[in-house]
């Protein structure tokens, strides 16, 4: 009975450690496609590994797979909302010319982290493209 209990305790811990190992290896690489391959392996072990999702979203963004990046950042926001995920999802939406969606994401990012300066700038850009020039100037001024 004790052996069975130990297996149930150590196998999940081993799996989580293995997923983290894949994430660390991916971060050492420079090619986004290679990074995605390792991050996919981490996510096969732990589908809710937020770091793997985040860095895979960044890698997809770098490959201009903005829809794929949006999906990864959305999963993170579903499990554990944070300013960086909103900000990066906003950047992906902005590149797809979804300025209203980007605006909402930048606002959420600033709500969670008012010191995220890049979000003010990108919020200003989104407002500019939506024709809110006064609002854009206000954000650029911050």
Image: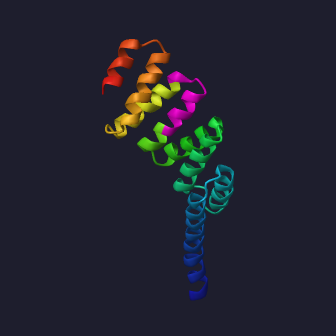
- The residue sitting at 60% across, 40% down in the picture is 61
Q: Is residue 110 magenta?
A: no
Q: Is residue 96 magenta?
A: yes
Q: Position of residue 74 (x, y in %)?
A: 55, 41
Which part of the image, by quadrant, shows the N terminus?
bottom right
Which part of the image, by quadrant, shows the C terminus?
top left
Q: Which of 116 and 7 lies nearest the eye of the viewer?
A: 116
- Left or right of 136? Residue 56 is right
- The residue sitting at 55% across, 63% down in the picture is 24
In this rendering, the count of numbered labels is 0
Residue 140 versus residue 73 in the image, above or below: above
Residue 25 versus residue 90 in the image, above or below: below
Q: Position of residue 106 (x, y in %)?
A: 43, 31
Is any atom of residue 1 visible in this view?
no
- The residue sitting at 61% across, 47% down in the picture is 59
- Kindly indicate the quadrant of the structure image that contains residue 96: top right
- Kindly indicate the quadrant of the structure image that contains residue 110: top left
- Left or right of 56? Residue 131 is left
Is any atom of residue 66 visible in this view?
yes
Q: Position of residue 88 (x, y in %)?
A: 50, 39
Q: Magenta segment, which residues? A: 88-100
Residue 56 versus residue 1 in the image, above or below: above
């Amino acid at each position: 009975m004790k052996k069975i209990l130990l297996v149930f305790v150590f196998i999940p811990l081993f799996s989580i450690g293995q997923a983290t190992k894949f994430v660390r290896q991916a971060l050492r690489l420079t090619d986004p496609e290679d990074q995605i391959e390792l991050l996919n392996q981490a996510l096969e072990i732990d589908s809710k590994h937020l770091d793997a999702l985040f860095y895979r979203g960044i890698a997809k963004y770098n490959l201009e797979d903005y829809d794929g990046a949006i999906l990864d950042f959305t999963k993170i926001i579903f499990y554990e909302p944070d300013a960086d995920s909103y900000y990066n999802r906003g950047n992906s939406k902005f590149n797809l010319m979804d300025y209203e969606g980007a605006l909402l994401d930048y606002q959420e990012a600033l709500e969670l982290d008012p010191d995220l300066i890049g979000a003010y700038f990108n919020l200003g850009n989104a407002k500019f493209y939506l024709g809110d020039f006064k609002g854009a100037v206000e954000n650029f001024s911050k």
